[in-house]
Amino acid sequence: MFENPPRSWLDEWRSMLRLAAPLVGANLLQMAVFAIDVVFVARLGPEALAASSLSVALFGLLVWSMTGLVGAASPLIAAELGRRRHAVREVRRTVRMAAWVGLLAAAVAIGVCLLGGPLMRLTGQQPGVIARAEPFLHILMWAAIPAVLAALLRTVVATLGRPGIGTAITAMAVAVNAAGNWIFVFGHFGAPAMGLAGSAVSSVVTSTAMLGAYALVIRFDRRLHRYRLLGRWWVPEWRRFREVLKIGLPICGTIIAEAGMFNGAAFVMGRIGEAELAAHTVALQFAAIAFQVPFGVAQAATIRVGLSYGAGDRQAIARAGRVAMLLGMGFMALSASVMMIFPHQLLWLYIDPTAPANARVVDLAVQYMMVAAAFQLFDGAQAVGAGMLRGLQDTRVPMLIALFGYWVPGVGTALWLGLHSPIGGLGVWIGLLVGLIFVAGLLLWRWHRRGRLGLLPA
């Protein structure tokens, strides 16, 4: 089912690649699921697109942070498997309590979505956009429960050595969401043309389909069925419940801190100018796509380090961490080189760089991409570094590092240079870079001092 910590560097490379590759694929496919909504809603007009974008931004942040919360199951399960290969009862209890936590978190997310209208008014959004966003969000919020539970099961099956299942189910979700938007937005197969609300319905259907697919796979996959992960779901295990919260809440906080910095940068760009905001949005798309690779490697690192942590093998912990960092940084060095050498070619994916009307946006986007190329390395380093530390079940201090690094030097520099210097939008991107440098540096320092800091098994 799950490999023991390997005894050679080559074995570790093979194990890490086998685990990371499908996780990266699933991350990229998840981006495609969200992109489909944009493709269909954009045909309804700019106001509908703005309403959808605002709602999805709020909902996405909530679900992403909740996913981090239930992601605590990964290091806990990996450690149990490292200690004892056939830890069936322990794995089942961890999954059960993580599901309880996920249900409570989803209920909180639904409550926040119900307050979506007032929150949008506080941020000064247009009344017409709010009027369309509020009912959209009140449908979309029901996707929170299946989305969070599906994210938990995706993490679990990957930790149990079946990461390809998540890739296949996410690929299925792309097709389901495309069909759902086509049916419900425009009205096909006898369904009414629901417009913007139809896209929200499609998201609920897609999330539910993903959860159902995971449940079926867990039930009928021979390797996974032996854990009986869906059994006795009503029985509490309060010690395990507290462990999930202890590890998961800081992961949730870290995600909110990072997402807050990047979302805040968009608001600052909006104050500087429309061209700056458009260029920022385009440049950030490339950085977000590239980030899915080290993010997948970080997920794999949590599992590989966690397995060795449970086994009490310090050498294997070091080996897994080094391989993960080399893999993540190697890709980010490649993506940074592509951004620096072929910026105009990349821009063709979103806008026509030769059109005179786009000249200002293109000029700014190229500037921002040069900074993005620089922060690729640090973005990859902080992602993998956080993943390695999660494998050691170390999440509280990394959360504090993220809160400080992103919001003090990061946001502080972005505000100062963006709003009070002549470089404007470029200063905002320099602020993002500064925040990533601080966080990456402090996380890697903590990883390298793991022994002296008492983070390793005795």
Image: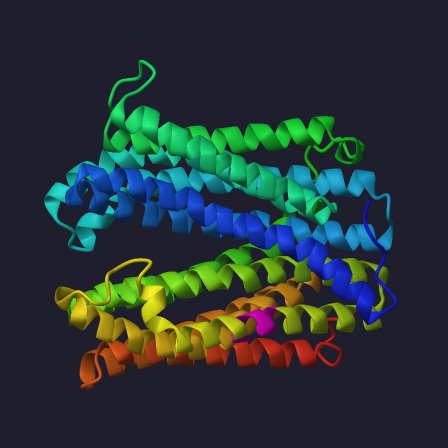
Would you say 457 lies left or right of 321 here?
A: right
Instruction: Answer whether residue 142 is visible to the viewer in this image.
Output: no
Q: Which residues are magenta?
A: 328-333
Residue, far front? 354
Q: Is residue 68 above or below residue 314?
A: above
In terms of image quadrants, where is residue 445? bottom right
Which residue appears at 60% of the width and 64% of the height?
395
Q: Nearer the viewer, residue 396 or 62?
A: 62
Which x, y percent locates residue 285? 37, 61
Which x, y percent locates residue 345? 35, 67
Q: Is residue 116 above or below residue 175?
A: below
Which residue appears at 73% of the width and 39% of the height?
93
Which x, y percent locates residue 18? 71, 55
Quarter placement of the C terminus: bottom right
Which x, y percent locates residue 111? 36, 39
Which residue appears at 26% of the width and 26% of the height?
186
**What predominant SS class does the magenta segment belong to?**
helix
Q: Nearer the viewer, residue 86 or 356?
A: 356
Q: Is residue 47 magenta?
A: no
Would you say 309 lies left or right of 199 here?
A: right
